[in-house]
Image: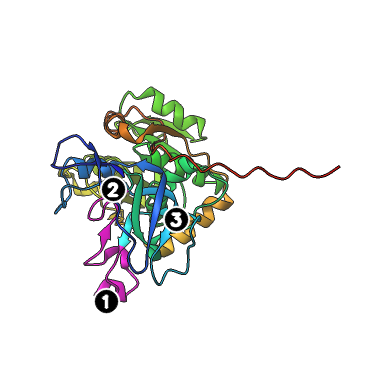
Amino acid sequence: MLAMRVHAAGSPLLAEQVAVREPGALQILVRVLACGVCRTDLHVADGELPDIPFPVIPGHEIVGRVERVGSGVSRFRVGDRVGVPWLGETCGVCAYCRRGLENLCERARFTGYTLDGGYAELVVADARYCCTVPARYSDAQAAPLLCAGLIGYRAYRAAGEGSLGLYGFGAAAHLLAQISRAAGRKVFAFTRPGDVAAQQFARSLGVAWAGGSDEPPPEPLDAAIIFAAVGALIPAALAAVRKGGRVVCAGIHMSDIPSFPYRLLWGERSVCSVANLTRADAAEFMQVAAAVPLDPRVETFPLEQANVALRRLREGQLQGAAVLVPTQPPQPPQSPQPRPVA
């Protein structure tokens, strides 16, 4: 199969022919129909995450069709459309797993990081960690739901009620803005300073205000979620939230947080992070996505143009999400249908 692999930190992905693995017990072989491009993929390609097992195939926002099933798989059948998310495996026995916190599992493995991911024509995944995706979305539209949606929704729940500031208006924020508006919440969008196009995009989705991350909002926020991997946004967000407000850091990697005066934290403000997701998160969010008519904005790229999509993401040149679409194999000809006899 064709796959885009990264061999060393900071090197471009290479298009290579890679052997197809047979699914083992409890696994499924999935033909990739679409794979979203996430900022975490940049962190993998740049070597910013620990213990990356190079060479690796990135990609953890996978929508595909089941081609083969391993022994013990009963949840999915050949031909089913499935989503393959970031959380790929957990041990089930560590202290976190026993407490129902599988997102913090000591021996978790992650799709597109410590497991080969979806920048490929096929991927093998543990069926227990895959999920169904709402039929209302096309393959490309559904792809960003698998991380921008899932982990974004976990951050959304951690933020609590009330008005919400979204720092970094990309794939996750543009979905959460729609969910928030459907729930009647006031949303404030913070973009890179001077990014007028992103601010106009945010306003088109119904946010109450959009401006640069160096600007204060017109009123104190109840909570803020930071999607941009910029540590300096934490004190900025703390300055923007009211007393008792919460700042949620939703990324897996962030630049160092600068020192800031205690007065920004005082008043029972708080800062927390969101790590990974659970299978329960996936089930709950997909129910929300089925009920709320989201409009995921996507720009598609052929699989072979993964480096172009990553560059566009790095440079902030996307509105919504980039999605890689492998070339699908030709389908066998259909038998002619018998004509009714007059």
Q: Is 183 placed left or right of 36 in the picture?
A: right
Name the residue: 26% across, 52% down.
Answer: 116
Q: Earlier in the sequence, mark 2 or mark 3?
A: 3
Q: Is 8 placed left or right of 250 in the picture?
A: left
Badge 1 vs badge 3, beta-carbon distance below 8 Å: no
Which residue occupies the foreground of this view, 288 or 155? 288
Q: To which residue does mark 2 refer?
A: 251
Asked whether residue 40 is drawn in magenta, I would say no
Asked whether residue 106 is drawn in magenta, I would say yes
Which residue occupies the foreground of this view, 285 or 3? 3
Give the quadrant of the C terminus.
Answer: top right
Residue 322: x and y in percent read 38, 35
Q: Is residue 154 visible?
A: yes
Q: Residue furthest right?
A: 342
Q: To which residue does mark 3 refer?
A: 66
Name the residue: 16% across, 45% down.
Answer: 48
Instruction: Kindly indicate the quadrant of the structure image that contains residue 325.
Output: top left
Name the residue: 52% across, 35% down.
Answer: 206
Q: Amino acid at mark 2?
A: Gly
The range drawn in magenta is 89-117
Q: Secondary structure at mark 1?
A: loop
Residue 143: x and y in percent read 43, 45
Residue 75's mark? Answer: none
Seen in the picture, residue 52 relative to 229 is either above or below; the reply is below
> Dominant secondary structure of the magenta stretch?
loop
Q: Amino acid at mark 1?
A: Val
Q: To which residue does mark 1 refer?
A: 93
Q: Earlier in the sequence, mark 2 or mark 1?
A: 1
Q: Secondary structure at mark 3?
A: strand
Q: Secondary structure at mark 2?
A: loop
